[in-house]
């Protein structure tokens, strides 16, 4: 059986989609390729979006958090994605600035305990 995604002739893997589309969905949250990948925009193997700002590569979620703060993140601070989707930097209230890694890990632990996180 062929992949159910239009224009794909690869054999289906599970649920009617091929392995390439399954991996793309895992990483990007969509079966589609990102239109502006390669134009200063890319997604790493974990699903985090990086962009080019002033000639430097930065993670988009960090850039947006710093833009909201109006300054650089404090040393040791981390940005948490509330919906656990590292590519989703534009859903309102999705990004939370954590003062340190321990607090970030605590958020993941509490979300898992409360059933909000699938990992």
Image (cartoon, grey):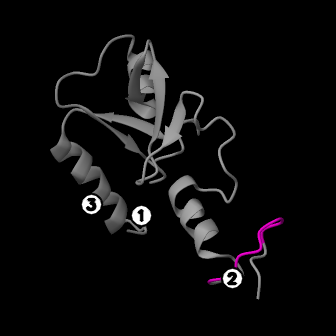
Mark 2 and mark 3: Cα distance apart in space: 35 Å
Relative to 43, is 61 above or below? Answer: above
**Extent of the magenta region:** 5-13
Q: Secondary structure at mark 2?
A: loop
**Other-residue count near label 2 (Cα within 10 Å), few / some / many at <14 / 14–19 / ≥20:** some
Residue at left offset 44%, top offset 16%: 67
- Disc 1 marks which residue? 117
| Front of the two marks 2 and 3 | 2
**Is residue 112 placed above or below 87 in the rendered structure?**
below
Q: Which residue is mark 3?
A: 109
Main SS category, magenta section: loop
In primary-sequence order, the first of circles 2 and 1 is: 2
**Whether residue 4 can be seen here:** yes
Residue 9 location, quadrant: bottom right
Residues at circles 1 and 3 in contact by the CB criterion of under 8 Å? no
Q: What is the C-alpha distance between the residues marked 2 and 1? A: 28 Å
According to the picture, the residue beneath numbered tag 2 turns out to be 12
């Amino acid at each position: 059986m062929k992949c159910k995604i239009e224009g794909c002739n690869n054999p289906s893997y599970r649920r009617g989609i091929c392995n390439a589309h399954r991996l793309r969905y895992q990483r990007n949250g969509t079966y589609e390729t990102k239109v502006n990948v390669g134009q200063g925009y890319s997604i790493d193997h974990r699903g985090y979006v990086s962009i080019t700002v002033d000639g430097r590569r930065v993670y988009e979620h960090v850039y947006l958090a710093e833009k909201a703060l109006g300054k650089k993140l404090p040393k040791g601070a981390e940005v948490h994605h509330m919906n656990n989707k590292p590519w989703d930097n534009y859903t309102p209230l999705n990004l939370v600035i954590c003062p340190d890694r321990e607090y970030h890990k605590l958020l993941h632990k509490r979300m898992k305990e409360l059933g909000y996180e699938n990992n």
